[in-house]
Image (tube, rainbow, N blue to C red):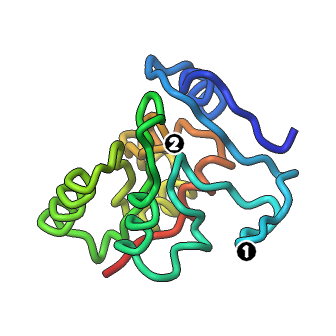
Amino acid sequence: PPIVASGSSTAAAARATGRPSPMGGTSVRSQPSNGASPDGRRAGRPIGHGLTPQAVGMREGLTAAMGSYLSLDTSKVTGGASTMWDMDADWISFPVLRGLVEAFRRKGGMIFQGNMTSVDELVRAFESPEDYPNLIVRVGGFSARFVSLNRAVQQEIIQRHRHTG
């Protein structure tokens, strides 16, 4: 099947790392057989994480993408309406991140997760995993050591849309 859903991120962690995670929740992952979507996502590319807009739909910037999520009625979402916001490491700073998270929370956002590791560092870890045994990344519902993830998941994290100012 094109999309695999599981009742917990324990199953997702096991798929990504080969080991279960104690975290609970729901996960959905993309398969190479996923077709293209009308919003411009190409065949085989990952679908959005949780309620995060697709990367191809985030052309107007981070605040517009957050506004899209925040316009949804999440009152009936059980377990939290999660989002994944990966930031460009050269742009993000603690004050900027704090402002984003505070605005997100004030406007009703539930789960704000993401990465701030530079793409260059991720690529170096992909190419020389022995040099990066402790690099932790947010996968989607759980965190893991980057080098413990399977290569396809590592590539998906490297290729994620990075937000800039």
What residue sits 79% from the left and 47% below the top? Answer: 31
Question: Is 6 left, or right, of 43 in this rendering?
Answer: left
Front residue of this view, candidates 82 and 148: 82
Graded by Cα atoms within 10 Å as few (under 14), some (14 to 19) or many (20 or more), the crowding at tag 1 reads few
Residue 36 visible to an observer of this rendering: yes
**Quarter-wise, where is residue 89 in the image?**
bottom left
Percent x, y of residue 25: 50, 26
Residue extending furthest left?
A: 95
Q: Specify the amino acid type for callout 1.
A: Gly
- Residue sitting at 52 percent across and 74 percent down? 58
Query: Of the numbered discs in the image, which one, if any, rests on residue 40?
Result: 1
Relative height, residue 28 to residue 92 (above, below): above
- Evaluate if marks 2 and 1 touch, with contact meaning CB atoms under 8 Å apart: no
Using the image, determine if residue 143 lies above or below residue 71: above
Count up the numbered dots.
2
Q: CA distance from mark 2 to mark 1?
A: 31 Å
Q: Nearer the viewer, residue 49 or 88?
A: 49
Query: Looking at the figure, which quarter contains the N terminus?
Result: top right
Quadrant for the C terminus in the image = bottom left
